[in-house]
C-alpha cells in the first residue's frame, strides 16, 4: 500500500548500529562498545524516561555528513515499506546547544531529502520542532536561525516534555512562525497533565493545523467537534504509545477513525520503539480489528492532510485508489 508518514522524529531513527558507527567515526565515548550494549540502554516506561535516553544519544551527531546519513538511512527504510511521502521532525536546539551549527543540521538533513527523492522517488520535508522544556527565548532564537532556510523547512512543531510546558508558552513564537510562512503542528502527548487545556490552547489559541498524538481530544466534546469541523489531522503512533503509557490506545484511535476524524498512523521514534510505519499499522490493525478499508482510510487521511501541493496530493491519492481497487485484500 502506498503510505505517508507525518509523525517521525529524525533523531528517533538512530538505530544502535548507526549510533555505534557514528560514535566511532567522531571519537565520541558513549559508554558502550557493541550493538547489544547500545540496544540494552534503549529502555524506558514514560515520556520523561524516554527523553532521558533519547537526548544524550544525539551526542554522536556532529557533522553535516552525520545528519545526512541518519536521514538517508530512515528514508531508505521508509521507501522499503512503500512510504511515498514523509514529513520529518527535527530538534535543532538540542544540536545547537551542543555546539553544532544550525546550518550543519539543516544542510545535512536536506541533502538526504534531495538524494532520497532522486534515488528512491520518496518525497519528504522537514518540520522544525521547538523543544518545549527549553526557554521561549531559545525557541525565538531558533526561529530566527531558521528564516534563511525557510525554503528547506515546511513547518514548525512542538515536542519534548509536555509537563508544565503548555502550548500557550509558545504562542508568540508560533504566531511569528506562521507569519513567516511556516505550517504549524504540535504535540499534545498521550494522557498528559492538563491535557484538555493543552489541546484547547493548541486548537483555539495557537491555531494548530494538526495534532501530534492528540487522542485525548475525545475527553472534550467541544474540542472534538472543532477537530472534526476544521478537518484537523491526528498523527497517532500506537507502538510509541505502548512504551510511554500503559497501552497502545488502539481502541480510541479506531473510534476516532471510524467517526470520520482524520486519524493517521505513524512511527514517532522507530529506532527506540522498534516499529516503522508498517509495524505500527499492523499493531493497530490487530489491536482494533481494522478492516482492509480502514487501513486504506488511514493512508487516505495522511495524504489529505500532508503539507504537499495539490498535484502531488492527487497523484498519491490516485496511487492509493489504484491499490485499493485491487481484488487482493490489502495488507500493511
Ligand atoms: N520527541 C521525540 N519523540 C517524542 C514524543 N513522542 N513526544 C514528545 N517529544 C518527543
Ligand atoms: Zn512525537
Image: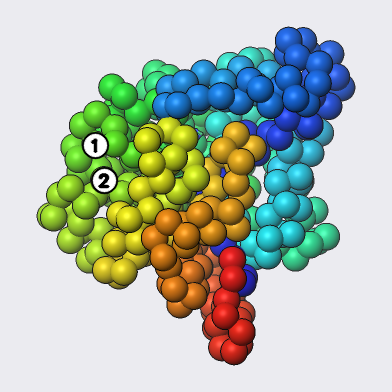
Residue 60 position within the rendered picture, expressed as x and y whole percent measured from the top left: 73, 21
- Could you tell me which secondary element the residue under label 1 belongs to? helix
Q: Which residue is mark 2?
A: 216
| Quadrant (top left, top right, bottom left, bottom right) of the C terminus | bottom right
Residue 4 position within the rendered picture, expressed as x and y whole percent measured from the top left: 56, 62
Residue 280 seen by the camera: yes
Q: Is residue 234 left or right of residue 109?
A: left
Q: Residue at x 66, y 22 (%)?
A: 40
Residue 96 seen by the camera: no
Q: CA distance from mark 2 to mark 1?
A: 7 Å
Residue 273 position within the rendered picture, expressed as x and y whole percent measured from the top left: 57, 38
Q: Residue at x 21, y 52 (%)?
A: 218
Instruction: Choose between 283 and 112: the one closer to the eye.
Output: 283
The response on whether ligand 1 sits within 8 Å of label 2 is: no
Number of labelled discs? 2
Which of marks 1 and 2 precedes in the sequence? 1
Instruction: Choose between 186 and 191: the one closer to the eye.
Output: 191
Q: Is residue 138 left or right of residue 189?
A: right
Q: Dot 1: within a 10 Å radius of its alpha carbon, few (fewer than 14), some, or many (20 or more) residues?
A: many
Question: Residue extending furthest right?
Answer: 25
| Quadrant (top left, top right, bottom left, bottom right) of the N terminus | bottom right
Q: Residue at x 57, y 80 (%)?
A: 329
Residue 2 position within the rendered picture, expressed as x and y whole percent measured from the top left: 62, 70
Q: Dot 2: within a 10 Å radius of its alpha carbon, few (fewer than 14), some, or many (20 or more) residues?
A: some
Residue 157 in which image quadrant:
top left
Q: Is residue 318 above or below residue 250?
A: below
Q: Are marks 2 and 1 in contact (CB under 8 Å)?
A: yes
Q: Residue at x 50, y 54 (%)?
A: 283
Q: Which residue is mark 1?
A: 195
- Could you tell me which secondary element the residue under label 2 belongs to? helix
Amino acid at each position: 500500500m502506498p503510505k505517508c508518514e507525518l509523525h517521525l522524529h529524525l533523531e528517533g531513527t538512530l538505530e544502535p548500529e548507526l549510533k555505534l558507527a557514528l560514535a566511532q567515526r567522531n571519537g565520541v565515548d558513549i559508554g558502550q562498545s557493541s550493538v547489544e550494549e547500545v540496544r540494552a540502554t534503549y529502555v524506558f516506561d514514560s515520556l520523561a524516561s524516554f527523553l532521558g535516553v533519547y537526548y544524550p544519544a544525539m551526542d554522536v551527531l556532529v557533522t553535516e555528513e552525520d545528519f545526512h546519513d541518519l536521514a538517508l538511512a530512515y528514508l531508505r527504510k521508509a521507501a522499503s515499506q512503500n512510504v511515498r511521502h514523509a514529513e520529518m521532525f527535527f530538534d535543532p536546539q538540542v544540536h545547537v546547544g551542543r555546539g553544532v551549527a544550525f546550518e550543519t543540521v539543516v544542510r545535512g538533513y536536506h541533502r538526504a531529502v534531495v538524494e532520497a527523492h532522486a534515488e528512491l522517488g520518496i518525497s519528504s520535508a522537514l518540520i522544525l520542532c521547538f523543544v518545549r522544556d527549553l526557554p521561549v527565548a531559545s525557541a525565538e532564537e531558533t526561529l530566527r536561525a531558521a528564516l534563511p532556510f525557510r525554503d528547506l523547512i515546511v513547518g514548525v512543531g512542538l515536542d519534548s516534555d509536555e509537563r508544565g510546558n503548555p502550548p500557550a508558552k509558545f504562542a508568540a513564537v508560533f504566531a511569528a512562525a506562521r507569519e513567516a510562512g511556516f505550517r504549524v503542528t504540535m504535540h499534545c502527548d498521550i494522557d498528559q497533565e492538563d491535557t484538555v487545556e493543552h489541546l484547547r490552547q493548541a486548537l483555539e489559541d495557537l491555531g494548530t493545523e494538526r495534532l501530534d498524538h492528540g487522542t485525548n481530544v475525545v475527553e472534550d466534546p467541544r474540542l472534538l467537534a472543532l477537530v472534526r469541523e476544521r478537518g484537523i489531522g491526528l498523527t497517532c503512533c500506537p507502538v510509541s504509545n505502548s512504551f510511554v503509557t500503559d497501552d497502545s490506545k488502539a481502541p480510541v484511535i479506531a473510534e476516532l477513525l471510524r467517526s470520520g476524524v482524520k486519524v493517521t498512523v505513524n512511527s514517532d521514534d522507530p529506532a527506540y520503539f522498534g516499529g516503522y510505519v508498517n509495524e505500527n499499522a499492523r499493531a493497530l490493525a490487530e489491536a482494533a480489528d481494522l478492516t482492509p478499508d480502514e487501513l486504506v482510510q488511514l493512508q487516505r487521511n495522511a495524504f489529505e492532510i500532508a503539507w504537499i501541493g495539490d498535484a502531488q496530493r492527487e497523484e498519491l491519492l490516485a496511487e492509493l485508489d489504484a491499490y485499493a481497487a485491487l481484488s487482493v485484500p490489502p495488507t500493511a
